[in-house]
Amino acid sequence: MQQQLDQLLYQGFLQHTAWQHLLRYPAYLKAILLRLDKLKHAAQRDQQKMREMAAFLQQWQQRYERMQQRRQYDERLLELRWSIEELRISLFAQEVKTAYPVSLKRLQQRWQELGL
């Protein structure tokens, strides 16, 4: 969750984040708080959901880091970045509601569709 917060709230994020994504920040932050609260009684479930996401997150992170090292910009990766935030809501704080239907399977399919 700390890594997620670091990716959301960094110096200059207001300048670098599109308005439509900034509008979702209250949902992302509320979902983090709910997830923290649920950890008290559902830590194993949380760990299981993290394991389910781990391979996709690692794949995305590696591709994103390569993009940054090359000083490139790839809108496809940024699209998936925000879908990952929505996926976290879906997995860890369903009561917050996602902006659109999202699942790990959908993200994997979208990765393929985008040719990544």
Image (cartoon, rainbow, N blue to C red):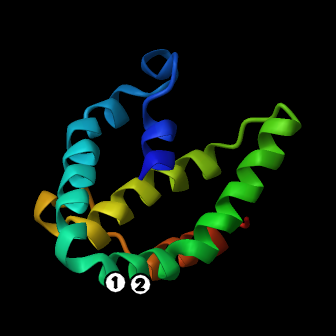
Residue at horizontal 59%, vertical 65%?
57
Q: Please say if the residues under marks 1 and 2 sit with CB atoms less than 8 Å apart.
A: yes
Give how far across and how far down residue 94 sits, in percent: 18, 68
- Residue occupied by mark 2: 48
Amino acid on which disc 1 is placed:
Gln
Q: Nearer the viewer, residue 20 or 69?
A: 69
- Which image quarter holds the C terminus? bottom right
Q: Is residue 100 left or right of residue 37?
A: right
| Left or right of residue 102, residue 104 in this image | right
Please tell me whether residue 81 is drawn above or below residue 7 in the rendered image: below
- Mark nearer the viewer, 1 or 2: 1
Q: Secondary structure at mark 1?
A: helix
Q: Quadrant of residue 55?
A: bottom right
Q: Which residue is mark 1?
A: 44
Q: Residue 41 at x, y = what percent?
A: 18, 76
Residue 88 in view of the camera? yes
Mark 1, other Cα within 10 Å: few <14 / some 14–19 / many ≥20? few
Q: Position of residue 36 (x, y in %)?
A: 25, 58
Q: Is residue 98 visible?
A: no
